[in-house]
Amino acid sequence: MSLAMKVYRALISPKIRVLVRRAEDFCEENLPTIHKTIFVPVKSLAKSVLSLLLKFSMSRKKESSAANLWKLSAKENFAPLISVVVPNFNHALYLRQRLDSVYNQTYKNFEVILLDDASTDNSTEILREFHERYKNNTRLVLNEKNSGGVFHQWRKGIELARGDLIWIAESDDFCAENFLAELVPAFADDAIQLAFCRSDFIKDGRKVFSTEQYLFDLPDFDWTKNFAMTAAEFVTQGFAIKNIIPNVSGVLFRKPKTFPEHCLDMKLCGDWLFYLDALKGGCVYYSPAATNFYRVHKESTSLKIQKEPRYFLEHEKIAAFVAENYSVPAEVHEKHFKKLEEHFFDYYGGKDSSELEKLFDLQKILNVKRKPNILMGVFALSIGGGEIFPLILANELNRRGYPVTVLDFQMEKDLADVRKKLNPTVPLLYINETDGLAEIVKHFKIDVIHTHHGFVEEATSYFTENNPKVLHIATLHGMYEEAEKNYLQKLLVRVKKSVDAFVYIADKNLTPFRENNFGREEIFYKIGNGLERFPINPVARSELGIPENSFVACVVSRAIPQKGWQAAIEAVKLANDGGRRIDLILVGAGELYDNLKDTLPEFVHMVGFRSNVRDYLAAADIGLLPSEYAGESFPLLIIDSFFAGRPVVSSNLGEVAAMVEDAGIVFDLVGGKVPIKELAKILRELADNPAAYEKIRSRVERVAEKFSIERVAEKYINLYEEKFS
């Protein structure tokens, strides 16, 4: 390889390096086609390389000189539903101005949730008036008893919200009519978790302060310009020192799955803690082009609390949360303490700094154990256990409060329905829209990269090999067993230097490592897959043209030959020679879907790709996995079927037998193929013998429990923390 090519490959992003290497290997070996595990024809590969090189070149030209800026991505026709929550308590004097500024927004796709917390003035009359006037997009909820705090009303509003984004428009504030129009577009970028605008402080009807004045002491920011920034950098550069966002009315954020309970008992800093929690792993956006008007009252609760010990105790809680969830140097916490010290001696009237140290223990903050920042690298947002599982794991880590970010390497076409499996509050990045992995790790302050596919491991290895402080964990889902021999050997050389821990889900995942004398047995850990439970709405059999008294089997997989669709059809045909009718539902997309859809018997029902697979499994009597795919390791269909309350009939591959236990029937392949007659016999027996069926069905719930994502995530968390510490 020429010196120029070596320099060139050192500069370009990891994904392009992998693609170029594959193209080089193809030319060197003069293969007629690229091996099936790459899934990319030669012309398509060349086109991808050219496209990525062009995109990389353009991104370098327009790179901002400000290293902390995050380049926003955009989406056409982006207009999500916004839920505007207006929590009111005795603010009748300001309500009309507040509500007029909401309903007069130039961005129109919003709903309004009017909340009243048992006001004693005439607030409810005004709220009812607006509810009647705008009944098409407004709901009114009146408390008979006061909730005890504004954050309880925030929680109620968020729980009632139907929108993708939340705006808590406090009842005594108001805003410019372009507030939503300016902030909503930022959320087209899946990494943005929160956006805010400038605020003017209003007292007795007059402007007394502005954002620029309030934040003059944070020199790393220019509040006259809009910016997007990673939460990690935003917190380090100032948000850990003071609450940069003075008022929630100037904020838009993604709807959280649950409200952070640790905010509820706070009187002053609960909003700050809420923002810090919402931002983890993602990015923040600021715009000075819209203004929020924050009304300051002479006798406000916040002013009173600043003269109480509680003020410092709440700041300590903020500092502890930052220390646990963000990678910030000690001097940032020291700056926070210095600001409190000024407040303690001046506004609070303190005399002895030892009293402050009892309220805000800096040493305790500096000793807090930090959670690692996790980057979940996925091959693509596409169908497959190795693609779906990392999204489910990321959701659970996010629910548990871990800073987690998903990075889509886009090595296959993304599917919108798969994207929906990732909670919107989990930040999502795309490798093509950045300057590569190194930039992401730097700006998001990543500690652990967790990958789930050999190609992603290879792409990541170019970075982690030279950055030993960043841990690389790889979960094996079966790709290595299917890889072409020459490529596998090259891959193993790369990952041996760069991966700190391999997680295998099936014993057979270890075969390629042992056959190639990989060694390093101490870095292999066995952890099975898991999924989350959620409500199921069984599809009506009548919608599919299936008689109610039929015995129904359901296959969910990619529609490729190795997944056994043809074998399932032939077995059901044979089993239908007599007795109770047997129907087959096929859920999935791929080449067989296109080839078979016009030639099926009446008892076979293909529905294409569906994201709600459990609804189809619940409409059936069994989940069926007639797979011949040698890479099958830990099929998620089995878990989905169990969580839908259905037993499984499956071929014996990977960990299937251990997964199914006695909650189904497992059969062996013969010469690598499904034994059609044996499968037909199994289906016939279950269809005609209710006792035999009930025997395996009754065991489903007990067996299913071991696949809860909560249990699986706990094992991964232990691994992260073991390696991180």
Image: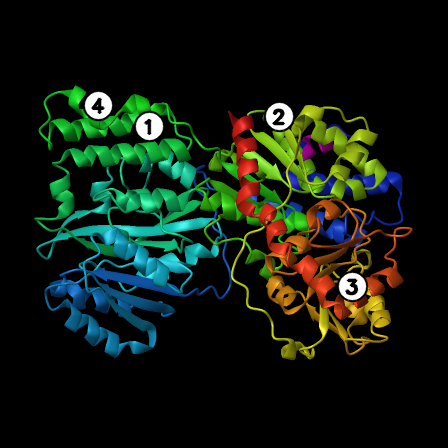
Q: Marks 4 and 1: CB-CB under 8 Å? A: no
Circle 4 sits on which residue? 357
The image quarter in which residue 2 lies: top right
Percent x, y for residue 661?
A: 70, 48
Q: Is the residue under label 3 in contact with that under label 4 (CB below 8 Å)?
A: no
* Residue located beneath label 3 in the image: 591
Around disc 4, counting alpha carbons within 10 Å, would you say few (fewer than 14), some (14 to 19), or many (20 or more)?
some
Kindly state the secondary structure of the residue where label 4 is placed. helix
Eye-nearest disc, 2 or 3: 3
Asked whether residue 672 appears in the rendered view, the answer is yes
The crowd level at tag 3 (other Cα within 10 Å; few <14, some 14-19, many 20+) is few
Q: Which residue is mark 1?
A: 332
The span shown in magenta is: 4-9
**Residue 67 occupies which quadrant of the picture?**
top left
Position above or below: 139 against 312: below
Going from N to C along the chain, the mark reached first, 3 or 1, is 1
Residue 396 is situated, as x and y percent measured from the top left of the image, at 51, 46
Q: Nearer the viewer, mark 2 or mark 4?
A: 4
Give amino acid for label 2: Asn
The Cα–Cα distance between marks 4 and 1, rounded to whole angstroms, is: 17 Å
Residue lying farthest right?
Answer: 671
Q: Is residue 169 left or right of residue 459?
A: left
Tag 1 or tag 4, which sits nearer the N-term? 1
Residue that badge 2 annotates: 466
Q: Amino acid at mark 4?
A: Glu
Distance, label 2 to label 4, CA atoms, is: 42 Å
